[in-house]
Amino acid sequence: MPKAKTRFVCQNCGYEAPRWMGRCPGCEQWNTLVEEVEPRPQGRSTSLSRSGATGEPVAIAAVEAAAEPRLAAGLSEVDRVLGGGIVPGSLVLVGGDPGIGKSTLLLQISRHVAAVGGPVLYVSGEESVRQVRLRADRLGALDEHLYVMPETELEQVAAAIERLQPKLCVIDSIQTVYRSDVQSAPGSVGQVRECAAELMRLAKTLGVPIFIVGHVTKSGDLAGPRVLEHIVDTVLYLEGERHQSYRILRAAKNRFGSTNEIGVFLMEENGLVEVDNPSEAFLAERPTGAAGSVVVCSLEGTRPLLVEVQALVAATTFPAPRRMATGVDYNRLVLLLAVLEKRAGLNLSAHDAYVKVSGGARIDEPAGDLAVVTAVASSLRDAPVPERMVILGEVGLTGEVRAVSRLDERLGEAAKLGFTDFLVPAGNLRRSRTARERPPGLRIHAVSTVEQAIAIALSLNGRAAAAAGWQPD
């Protein structure tokens, strides 16, 4: 019998090396190469093939541009993140911290699809049938078309999918599934890669959408090789603080829609409940008259979302002040603090600075720069920002305030929640609506520099505002 061939695969990036090396040439990480036995050749090819493909080149103009039918998930927030619903034949990877609600969310989706679409196969590799039944009782997910299969061998799972032809299949989780022809433990680099490739082949050839659950590491990244994220069509992350009730569903990758949309849920006893007005929910516990609290309207895909930015600035005796950011990019925070010290004259080198976005939300766009800057200045001077003020703007390295996109939509969303004062870049007013077209009762303050914004937001006296060069709109 021929000796089995071995290879060394990086657990982080999937790089294959002919021999063991201390440092991976692909991702340059140390001690990530593990030895694996190459799988024996099988009679059936595991290459990815789509149903109806001929293998011949076709002119792109001759391809039929038909809209892809989608399957409703039963939760409009999930449909929003997926780009309009579940695409048949898609492979979706769902990641998140343990206990965050991944299995609960997928069981709720399975219940709806089973009730309206047909059979659904839920493959549980970590829990027994009785455990799944207990969760189904709590969620009200008992349906005669929902089938549970406690199995970890991929060949058995594939046979069940081909036999049942479900409208939806859930694999919980990919780290527990293994192929018998791969000589490595479940959850290893080779097993995860080969199992994901086989599931992709099944999804494309049978037209069955498959959701797979993936574990995450301590740093929040999906466990296993990065190639797993390249194989699947969509990567979803379910985020949120374990001790808080709100959960946010984000798309890190989506071949069938935008990656900027988010879905907001509230974890209750009977499962995840959609939040109709996330802005109101995130601002529900905002303190009144507190220094360092600022409201900003961030865009998450097509949805304007109002969130609270909090800052705490405290004096320190250490030579290197501490900076900490939650919900805001750390490097961006350090850059903004440098702008404040250089352009606005604030002494932050002797103070620790902590910035947080409340409710577990996150601000990725530069339109939140001015809100972060104002919150830090408010905390440093212990002067609160007006309670009904929303602050928007991108901050440049020279201290200028740059225009933001879709200002009118942000103003309209904030006006619905009762906000009346808006601190916006002066550049936006030149291409925004006229004052007559804006919602009535709004006071728009246009600023061009960081100094002007701080002078207005902290309600300084007229002499200080005039010295900063601010003129009312």
Image (cartoon, grey):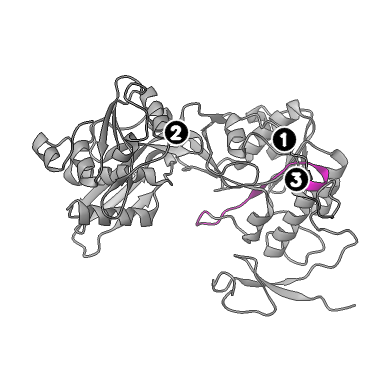
Q: Which residue is mark 1?
A: 67
Frontmost residue, 281 versus 398: 398
Side of 37 relative to 376 (left or right): right
Q: Earlier in the sequence, mark 1 or mark 2?
A: 1
363 w.r.t. 324: above or below? above
What segment carries the magenta color? Answer: 204-220
The span from disc 1 to disc 2 (Cα, nearest Å) is 27 Å
Q: Residue at x 67, y 63 (%)?
A: 189
Dot 1 lies on which element? loop
The span from disc 2 to disc 3 (Cα, nearest Å) is 37 Å
- Quadrant for the N terminus in the image: bottom right
Contact between marks 3 and 1 (CB within 8 A): the answer is no
Frontmost residue, 372 versus 42: 372
Q: Residue at x 27, y 43 (%)?
A: 375
Disc 1 marks which amino acid? Ala
Disc 3 marks which amino acid? Ala
Question: Which quadrant would residue 148 be assigned to in this image?
Answer: top right
Q: Which residue is mark 2?
A: 304
Contact between marks 2 and 3 (CB within 8 A): the answer is no
Of the two numbered discs 1 and 2 in the rendering, the one whose residue sits closer to the viewer:
1
Q: Which residue is mark 3?
A: 61
Question: Which quadrant would residue 288 be assigned to in this image?
Answer: top left
Question: Which x, y percent locates residue 405?
Answer: 42, 39
Residue 135 appears in view = no
Side of 396 relative to 54 (left or right): left
Q: What mark, if any, has residue 206 been given in the picture?
A: none
Q: Earlier in the sequence, mark 3 or mark 1?
A: 3
Label 1 Cα neighbours within 10 Å, binned few <14 / some 14-19 / many ≥20: few
- Quadrant for the C terminus in the image: top left
